[in-house]
Image: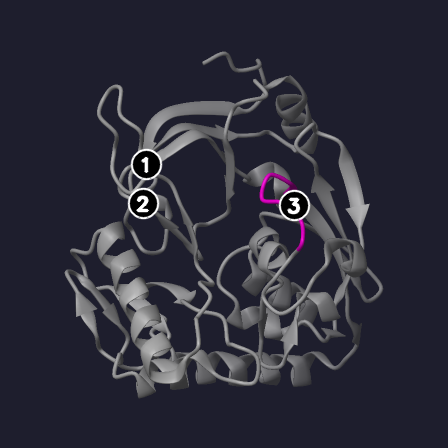
Amino acid sequence: MSLPKTRGRYLFDVPLAPTTWFRVGGAAQVTFKPADIQDLCFFLKNRPTNLPLHTIGVGSNILVRDGGVEGVVIRLGQGFNNVYINGTSLDIGAAVLDRNVADLACGAGIAGLEFLCGIPGTIGGALRMNAGAYGSDISQVLEYALVLDPKGTLHRLTNQELGLAYRHCDLPKDWIFVGARLNGQVGNEKEIQEKISSFLKEREKTQPVKSRTGGSTFANPEGKKAWELIDRAGCRGLRKGGAMMSELHCNFMINEGGATAADLENLGEEVRQRVLETSGVSLRWEIERIGFKSMPAIGEKAA
């Protein structure tokens, strides 16, 4: 594999399990940690055109399959951690944690971004899926996102251009979010902090936040709640191998300690099948699944 000479780092055949919240999955053929936006642009402009790419943040909402990931996994780090506050606007790098954005906005007396404290992961991931919580989502606070296309050209795109909808973005998977401008409104720091604290207390009471999980497994169907459909289908506490649907919140999958990626994915598919049979609703995965289900033998096609 011929890779361009960058200022960032290439790592080869590095297991991805330790870097994801589920703690499962195989290795990445190549992991690339770009130094900054310019370095990532250079990589994209000069990479082999047939090279598969995947972008991962802190691995909070992703299931890496056991067979590993072909091509290059791009991990945005320190060069994408910038935060600049101007009035009630925040210019934020894609690698900044959602929780940190809520706290920074609070310290600056900016209201309207409190909901981010309840979203695991980074701003890049939140943009990719239009993440939301507590009645708000990214589309309601986003002025524009900074995105690199597969050829390394930088675009500044609005909500409408991104096609943001409930837990959805129209952009192809090979476009990479590198930053955003979020807008809040003038608020009182004490009131903002109280709101964040109440959200966090509610989250701890209702979600298995101390378990190996990936957040909500399935998106809510229109007019319905995924957890209610899952509960009605008898899937609360359902197990496959070392994977279980949480007793506390049955739309959360948990790695109880010995699960494989296959255990988790098979559990999710079993839940989808049972919900379809009991309610006629086909649940949509909210967790992104990438990679091969099993490592192919030489000359064989991957599963």
Q: Is residue 29 above or below residue 83?
A: above
Spatial CA distance of label 1 from label 3 is 23 Å
Q: Callout 2, which amino acid?
A: Arg
User: Crowding near pointer 2: few (<14 within 10 Å), some, many (20+)?
Assistant: many
* Amino acid type of the residue tagged 1 in the rendering: Gly
Answer with mark 3 or mark 2, whichever residue precedes in sequence. 2
* Residue at horizontal 56 percent and vertical 18 percent from the top: 48
Q: Quadrant of residue 11?
A: top left
Mark 3 Cα shell of 10 Å, populated few (<14), some (14-19), many (≥20): many
Residue 51 location (% of width, % of height): 51, 24
The CA distance from mark 3 to mark 2 is 23 Å
Coloring basis for residues: one colour
Q: Tell me, yes or no, whether the highlighted magenta stretch contains residue 200.
A: no
Give whichever of discs 1 and 3 has the lower sequence position.
1
Is residue 168 rendered to the left or right of residue 3?
Answer: right
Residue occupied by mark 1: 68
Q: Is residue 22 above or below residue 216?
A: above
Which of the pair 249/205 is nearer the observer?
249
Q: Which image quarter: residue 70?
A: top left
Which residue corresponds to mark 3? 177
Instruction: Return the residue at label 2.
Output: 65
Answer left or right for 183 relative to 265: right
- Between 49 and 76, the residue placed more toward the observer is 49
Mark 2 touches mark 1? (CB < 8 Å): yes
Under circle 2, the secondary element is loop
